[in-house]
Image (tube, rainbow, N blue to C red):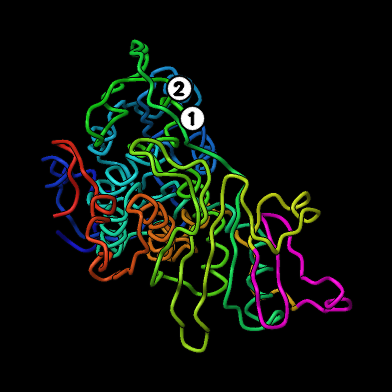
């Protein structure tokens, strides 16, 4: 193979072997797409978040669409008439002209779709959380790094200006060194009872493909198409859904990575099938250089820190509260407030230093074309996802976890391993 061959020419030459997920070969990216050339993008999951992501990349060439719902796929195909259509993303990834793939499936198939796309040399944009389990997350993160491919997780709020201003305030020392953060989200999933009826699978739904790697179980509208986040088999409730959005802010501002300990402060009794409707979890992060250790406490389901007064809570139903030596900073997606307000009268905010984003999807596209890097690449968003998921692991294990991020083990709690490691049915394995 000559180095002057373009990557797309290499893909089109038919050199991708299709021997199953576990044996899909790695190959070198033989060149980059010209900045003036449109990418050929395949999209897995075309409605809901998938529809938003599809719109976000629609100025490129949409050459492949995949969805297990025939009605949704037909609707998208009518808008992108030159795209080939698939029900099975494994078949879609055999299409040789794909440069990049957008993964917008439910959480339980994120890892398999992202991993296979990466292993076949495609750049990947994946919805958050990156995966359903911690072990999957590490495999996908490591694979992206090994393949030297451009990745981005779907934490779109990261691209908004408010997060940039908060990061600047924290890093400029406006409230002094921060050693405590409270993240609270007024969202509730789970607390459900397993259904006992057995409805028929709709004719338009390829349910076996929707299950993907999950061990076979009966169809029910209690999880298809939307409420899958209520169930451990498919998602992780509010913590896995919103953890990557709201914890993103302290991760960015405080340069966090892996927690040292994870402990449930309060919550309902664990259910083997359904996620908790409310939960309070405390993470402890070690010092990073001259930055002090940080205790980060997560709340969902209407719970919130005591420092948020009833009056303040009526105005800030969800938020991130940074506590520093000189004051506090409260933020959500669109606003931020220095507290106590009387202490910051006349405060002059720092001049912006973090440039505006060109757009979360556009970052990914331009990084592919120009051999660049995104702000939420998997080396950043992988540890963020792992942290969110570890809160659920501590809850299900019923014990404070002492975490070893290198060994991917709770060293004091071997029983937690069952919730850390993924379990797939035959034909859907990833990693070695």
Q: Position of residue 306 (x, y in %)?
A: 68, 61
Q: Position of residue 352 (x, y in %)?
A: 71, 74
What residue is shown with label 2? 72
Quadrant the N terminus occupies:
bottom left
What residue is shown with label 1? 47
Closer to the chain start, of discs 1 and 2, is: 1
Residue at position x 45%, y 53% in the image? 153
Q: Position of residue 219 (x, y in %)?
A: 33, 20
Distance in Å between CA atoms under marks 1 and 2:
6 Å
Does the residue at mark 1 contact the one at mark 2 (Cβ under 8 Å)?
Answer: yes
Q: Which residues are magenta?
A: 321-349
Quick check: 275 above or below 185? Answer: above
Residue at position x 26%, y 36% in the image? 95
Quick check: 405 above or below 312? Answer: below
Q: Secondary structure at mark 1?
A: loop
Name the one closer to the observer, 233 or 71.
233
Count of marks overlaid on the render: 2
Q: Is residue 342 magenta?
A: yes
Residue 202 appears anywhere in the view: yes
Q: Could you tell whether 253 is left or right of 88 in the image?
A: right
Residue at position x 14%, y 46% in the image? 22
Q: Secondary structure at mark 2?
A: helix
């Amino acid at each position: 193979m000559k180095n002057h061959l373009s990557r797309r020419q290499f893909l089109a030459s038919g050199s991708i072997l299709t021997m199953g997920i576990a044996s899909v070969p790695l190959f070198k990216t033989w060149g980059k797409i010209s900045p003036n050339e449109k990418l050929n993008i395949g999209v897995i999951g075309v409605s809901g978040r998938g529809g938003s992501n599809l719109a976000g990349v629609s100025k490129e060439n949409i050459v492949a669409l995949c969805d297990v719902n025939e009605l949704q796929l037909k609707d998208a195909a009518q808008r992108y008439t030159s795209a080939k259509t698939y029900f099975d993303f494994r078949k879609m990834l055999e299409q040789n002209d794909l440069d990049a793939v957008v993964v917008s499936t439910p959480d339980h198939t994120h890892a398999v779709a992202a991993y296979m796309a990466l292993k076949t040399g495609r750049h990947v944009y994946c919805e958050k959380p990156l995966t359903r389990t911690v072990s999957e997350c590490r495999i996908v993160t490591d694979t992206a790094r090994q393949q030297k491919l451009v990745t981005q997780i779907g934490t779109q709020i990261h691209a908004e200006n408010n997060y940039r201003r908060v990061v600047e305030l924290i890093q400029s020392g406006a409230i002094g060194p921060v050693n405590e953060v409270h993240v609270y989200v007024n969202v509730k999933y789970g607390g459900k009872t397993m259904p006992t009826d057995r409805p028929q699978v709709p004719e338009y739904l390829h349910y076996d493909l929707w299950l993907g790697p999950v061990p076979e179980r009966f169809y029910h509208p209690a999880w298809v198409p939307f409420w899958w986040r209520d169930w451990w088999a498919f998602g992780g409730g509010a913590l896995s859904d919103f953890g990557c959005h709201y914890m993103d802010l302290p991760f960015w501002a405080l340069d966090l990575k892996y927690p040292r300990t994870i402990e449930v402060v309060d919550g309902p009794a664990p259910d083997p099938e359904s996620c908790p409707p409310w939960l309070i979890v405390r993470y402890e992060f070690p010092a990073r250089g001259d930055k002090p250790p940080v205790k980060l406490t997560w709340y969902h389901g209407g719970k919130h820190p005591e420092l948020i007064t009833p009056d303040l809570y009526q105005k800030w139903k969800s938020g991130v509260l940074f506590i520093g030596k000189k004051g506090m900073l409260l933020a959500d997606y669109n606003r931020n407030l220095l507290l106590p307000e009387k202490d910051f009268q006349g405060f002059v905010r720092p001049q912006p230093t973090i440039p505006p984003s060109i757009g979360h999807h556009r970052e990914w596209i331009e990084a592919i074309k120009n051999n660049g890097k995104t702000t939420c690449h998997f080396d950043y968003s992988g540890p963020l996802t792992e942290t969110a998921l570890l809160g659920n692991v501590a809850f299900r294990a019923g014990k404070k976890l002492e975490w070893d991020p290198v060994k991917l083990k709770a060293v004091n709690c071997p029983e937690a391993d069952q919730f850390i490691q993924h379990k797939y049915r035959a034909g859907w394995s990833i990693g070695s």
